[in-house]
Structures are given as C-alpha cells and as structure tokens.
Image: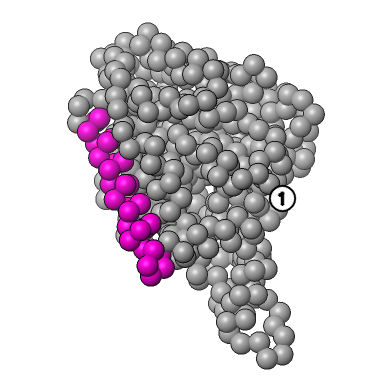
Amino acid sequence: MNANELTIAEARDALAKGELSAVDLTMACLTAIDAGTPLNAFVHTTPEIALDQARAADARRGAGTGALNGIPLGIKDLFCTRGVASQAASNILRGFKPEYESTVTSKLFEAGAVMLGKLNMDEFAMGSSNETSCYGDAVNPWKVDDRRLTPGGSSGGSAAAVAADLCLAATGTDTGGSIRQPAAFTGIVGIKPTYGRVSRWGIVAFASSLDQAGPMTKSVRDAAILLGAMAGHDPKDSTSADIPVPDFEAALTGDIRGRKIGIPREYRMEGMPAEIEALWARGREMLADAGAEIVDISLPHTKYALPAYYVIAPAEASSNLARYDGVRYGHRARLGQGDGIVDMYEKTRAEGFGKEVQRRVMIGTYVLSAGFYDAYYNRARKVRALIKRDFDEAFAAGVDAILTPATPSSAFGLGEMADADPVAMYLNDVFTVTVNLAGLPGISVPVGLDAKGLPLGLQLIGRPWDEAGLLNHAHVLERAAGFVEKPRKWW
C-alpha cells in the first residue's frame, strides 16, 4: 500500500511509531496529485507550503503534538487561505489571495495538518455536479463505462481527491447536501455537523443560515478525528455555538443496543430506484442486527423542503453576493467611455458570475423584492420552522437517529443533466436539504454498489449537537456494510 492510500488513523499510528515521516507522506500525496491531473480535483497546489509544514511536523513529533500532526489534507476552494488563491471557483474572484486565514484552516494547522492545495468545487458552492466551476468539471474517479461521471457537488473536488487517494482527507461545505451527496457518489464518508458547531469565519458565504463546513474522509473514524480538530466556538462567528467539543473518536464504541432508529415514511419517494430502496432496507437490517430498535416515523412537511430551500438559499445568496461589485476586490469589467457605476456593476457581474450563480441571484432578488417577500420568502421561512418542528417531535419521542437514502441515484455522467431543466438537477438534494433547513447533523456512509458497480450511500441524521452519537451509529453501519471497494485506477 502506498502512503497516500492510508487513512488518517493509520497514518497517525505509522507516524507515531516512526515507520513513516510526514515528508514521505506528503511526497506520496503530491506524486498522486500530479498523476491525478485528469480528475481536475486540485486546482491550486501548494507543494512548498506542504513540505514546509511536513518538515515542521516531523521536527515536533512526540512532545504533545496535535491530533493531525503531519497529516496531508486538501482544502476546498471556499476556505480563505492566507496568500493562496481562494476564489470559490468563480471568475469574479480570480487572483484573490486573502491576507487572512479561515478559522477552520487555522485550527487544522494548529493541529499539525499539512495543506496540499485547494480543491475544485461548484461556483460559490452552487451546484450538485461540480459543472459550474470556472476551473472546469471535477471528475469522479469511479468509472464503469466510457463516460466521465460527476463526483457530485458542490464539494466535488474534495470527494474526488479523497476517493482517489490524492490526499488523506479534505474539507467540504454543505448548504443543502454538498458534503453528503458527493461523499455518496464517490464511496467516502462525509459529515455535515450541527449548524454552529464549526466556525464559518473566513469561508466564502453562499447562504449564511444554511452553510456548514465538515470533513470528507475515507472512514467514520477519520471523520471523527478531523471534525474534532475543525469544531469549536469562535468569537469571530456570531452563529458559532459556545458548546464544548466532545472526543468524537472516543465515542466510537460500536454499541447501539437499545437505540431507536427512525425510518421516515415520507422519504419513500415516488419513482425511487429499486436499488436505493433495497439498500435502505439493508441498512435497517444492519442496524437492527446491531441491537437498535427500528421505528417508523413521520416527517410530514418533507415534501415542502425543496421548494422552501430553493427560496431561502437563493435569497441569502443574492444578499451575500451583492458585495461582488468590481469595487474593492476581485474582477472588474473593462468600462467604455461614458459608462457609469451601474454599468460597472452590471458588466462585472455578467462577466464574473456563471449561469447558475446568475440564475440563483435573480431568483433570490425576486423573492426578496417588494410585493413578493411575503408570498415567497416569509412563507418559506414558516415552512422551514415546520420542518424543524417535525424533527424536534421525532427526537422528543425518543428517536436517537434517522436513517434515509443519501441520494436518489448513483453518480450520473458529466453533461447529462447540465443543460436539462435546472429543477431536475435540484432534485439531487431531495434527501439532504431538510437537514440544513433544520440545522441538524447528517452523515453519508458508503454501504454498497449498484448494478453498474457505482457506490451508493445511506444518510444518518442525528439530534442537534449529538455528532458523537451520530458518528457511533455511522461507525456501526460502516462496520456492518464492510464497504472496502475503491475505484479502479484509470487516470
């Protein structure tokens, strides 16, 4: 096994025993990144920074080193990294190199992590297939025919890089499923924590009441290790919760006897592929075999989640993206004689924003406009409160976690949906958006392959602030499923 194929836990043990140096581990990843160019997962590599950090990790090994000392990671292009391009996969931020470090990357570096570079994503995290990026499509390392498949989105580069062993783990962000859907499409683990568990400071904003950063890893144990390093209160983020961060790894006892797992009847969607239905049934059996009690529950407002999400998220996006005006930073359009400030705004945004971002900004501006605010935005906020209440009632009735499919299908081909009705693409988020609307933690765990040989995942949804319990349920599911398949190397 090459060093870059190790999990965080395996690499941590090998580093501690002196069987491997952080420099060796980093070099193995940098070599894999060079070979993985056809995947277009890494869009800015930082080998000098990585090797400096690896040498520093080797020098301090032993005496009270951090949980990620010497572990090479990929960072989604949405996280601001000091002196390194951070452009949210958008032309409007081309050339932007922040003078500051996001709270998450600061915490990772304090824990000893090594940054290999920045990862591809959908522009401003708006997309479910990584086809809206100014860097071009990221490509799924799984290949079963002559098509290039999507790794999912918006954290598509992160998912592809972890699945292809270009890095040991990666950061992602999740506004409506952007960690969990790509994790399911690429056969890895992805957890979206409770809203407020991880600081959003220094992460380029999409929809501020929905965005949450989280880990994308090769195993549930790795997710627990990485989340422990990322989480914690941050005074710079007013939505960050001042709640202690438990030892997530220590919570992986593998014992869920007597725990109640809810199965929401509303997630049995019309036209759901038989393979997804069968996988969900298998997941129920595996958790029951581990001693959990399976109970049917109702989340009656589920059917309104997608419409509510696609009002609230674009509304917040139109507000957040108003700052990209060609004045202070990022792209500025070339102006003609007689052009005024409004011309500058319009031309800059027309050149800098891609079609999907423009579409969502226009929808968002519309639903916030006078005359439509109550009809759309306020109504969506009320629906959101009802969706949250559904979950609150299920948890109040004693449910410990909820099991659902992660995606309505396995990975589809790049280009197959991009030019279709955008609503068809939005349906990829059907199982994931409720979790963001309710601010809950959710995790995608790879459980099997479909008939074509592509990975499929199941989602577990946890109680607020109970990532420890959620990870333990996921650990049991992962162990029972025994998913060890990796993509065959074609790149």
- Tell whether 92 sits left or right of 458: right
What percent of the width, then of the height, locates residue 215? 48, 39
Q: Is residue 307 magenta?
A: no
Q: Quadrant of the C terminus?
A: top right
The image quadrant of residue 413 is top right
Q: Main secondary structure of the magenta part?
A: helix
In the image, residue 314 sits, relative to residue 281, either above or below, namely below
Closer to us: 23 or 254: 254
Q: Which residue is mark 1?
A: 136
The image quadrant of residue 130 is top right
Q: Is residue 386 magenta?
A: yes
Closer to us: 487 or 395: 395
Is residue 29 visible from the viewing direction of this image? Answer: no
What percent of the width, then of the height, locates residue 175? 46, 47
* Residue at (54% x, 17% y) in the render: 274
* Residue at (66% x, 41% y) in the render: 417
- Report the residue that reaches farthest toward the top: 289
The image quadrant of residue 141 is top right
- Report the residue that reaches farthest toward the bottom: 338
Instruction: Give the image's coloring scheme.
Output: one colour
Task: Read off the magenta span.
Answer: 368-395
* Residue at (38% x, 41% y) in the render: 304
Q: Amino acid at mark 1?
A: Gly
Label 1: few (<14), some (14–19) or many (≥20) C-alpha neighbours in 10 Å? some
In the image, residue 459 sits, relative to residue 389, either above or below, namely above
**Total labels drawn:** 1
Is residue 314 visible from the viewing direction of this image? Answer: yes
What percent of the width, then of the height, locates residue 97? 60, 65
* Residue at (32% x, 47% y) in the render: 384
Q: Quadrant of the N terminus?
A: top right
- Tell whether 48 sits left or right of 175: right
